Image (cartoon, grey):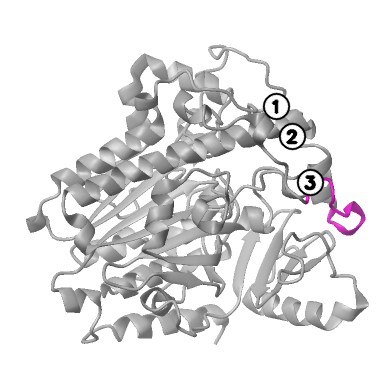
Amino acid sequence: MNRRTLLQNGVLLATSSLVGRRTFAAAAGPRPNVLLLMSDQHKRSCMGAYGDTVARTPNLDALAAKSVRFTNAYCANPVCTPSRASLMTGLYSHNHEAQDNAHPYSSRHKTMAHHFGAAGYTTALIGKMHWVDAQTHGFDYRLEFNDWFQSLGPKTAIYADELGRPNSGSGQPEIDDLWRDNGDPWKNVRHKDDRKGAVHVGRVSLLEEKEQFDSFVARESARFLRNHRSEDGPFFLVSSFLKPHDPFMPAQRFADMFRPEDMKLPASWGKADLDSLPREVVQSIRYNGPTPELSDEAAAKRHMAFYYANLAQMDDCVGQVLAALKETGHDRDTIIVYTSDHGEMLGDLGLWQKFEFYEGSCGVPLLAHVPGNPSGVVATPVSQVSLSATMADLCGVRQVAPNDGVSFAALVRDPKSRLDVGPVFAEYALNTPRAKCMVREGDWKYTFWAHDRDELYNLKTDPAELHNVAADARCRNQVEHLKAVLFAWHRPAEA
């Protein structure tokens, strides 16, 4: 029996054992509602609740105060589509087809929406999920980028200018195939600006705040909550924002909160030991293709300021959804989860964006609030691939298809629980020469590169990941052990 089969059987046994068990649903009568709040590219440490004194995230901080906050949560793949596919299906990337931002996954892989829908929930997705195709993936109710573009009308041209190029990760196109036959319909229509790469360093958006995508998501999520009737049964609502992902173009009032000259570059900026790192990482540090300007410290600080402004705007929109939840009385019987699809390096080691397994990129914020349950902090490493199993467990919902996740609901119910869910894994660029996989076990994080040098970090003694000790003879046993654990889970075909 392989690891995947073992995990699947364990999940099925866990979910089947919910029958007759006293859960939140059994204790409170009807099953609880679920509100899954998501953002895009939110660096885990960039939140007041996680200790950031620059970030302005009052709504997320208030949610964190009454939630279980996970300090070592990870995405399964540090790029949008694969990460979201893993989060929604509970499958690791090597078990679904969405290996990059251009390929969808099969309808045979069932999502959280299928599980909750089969249990009588009204399922709704409002915002970004980056499906890449037109499948509904089990949702009854769905509003995404194309609905926002319809509401913008001619002002969509302003957003096309802000993106500056095709970018499905930011919604143009939302479905790649729609542009594949005839090319980019905005070609020769966009107005060029002074950016040197594909991504702008940052400026104030020319769209009014109420017209921006995150405002649309907040407004329509609030409308859904106000329109939902108790006789319709419980709801499973995913409200998924774009920010703080690029374009780094917030509304004016959020841009005014942060001055570039007040930003401090990360302590690891300029300190990476280039001789010990994989070639791809070294190249990214020396030259950031999407935003070449970021090699300049002043431009880097400007970029950081607009990232924090985007984050503040997203937090404000989260607050609007939570206010509607309270206004409608749903806050008393709704489980609330907040997370992001991946992080953002934001200058750590001189790196930007995602794509890596360093904490800034692969680490994600994770908050879980269950009404009546204690709040707390959990340091146990967990994976987003297990969110589906965990949320189903919390609600007494049977999963309609097995997946790779292992429920950590016990940690949500009791943050002092000693539950050990085993090693955490992640992977990236499978079936390409850039393939790599990561395992986090205890304080150690090991990355195997199919065609480059390994990485090994002790996150307790080296939280900034400045010292790659994979080649240190004293760590040979640790490397061999973690490599064996990783390959028992999945060995890239390129290895």
Q: Amino acid at mark 1?
A: Gly
Residue 39: give x, y in percent of width and height.
46, 47
Q: Is residue 183 left or right of residue 316?
A: right
Q: Which residue is mark 2?
A: 289
Query: What span is in magenta?
Result: 268-278
| Residue 277 inside the magenta-drawn segment | yes
Quadrant of res 304: top right
- The residue indicated by pointer 3 is 269
What residue would you read off at disc 1? 197
Residue at image x 51%, y 52%?
48
Mark 3 or mark 2, which is nearer the start of the sequence? 3
Q: Are marks 2 and 1 in contact (CB under 8 Å)?
A: yes
- The answer, for residue 404, to whether it is visible in the render is no
Judged by its main secondary structure, the magenta piece is loop
Whether the magenta-drawn stretch holds residue 241 is answered as: no
Task: Report the residue at 54% width, 57% height from top.
Answer: 50
User: Within the image, what quadrant is residue 197 found in?
Assistant: top right
Mark 1–mark 3 distance (CA, rounded to whole Å):
21 Å
Disc 2 crowd rating (10 Å Cα; few below 14, some 14-19, many 20+) is some
Q: Are marks 1 and 3 in contact (CB under 8 Å)?
A: no
- Answer with left or right where residue 93 lies relative to residue 339: right
Residue for point 45% across, 26% down: 253
At a point 66% along the width and 58% down the height, the residue shown is: 359
Q: Nearer the viewer, mark 2 or mark 3?
A: 3
Q: Which is more toward the observer, 458 or 51?
A: 51
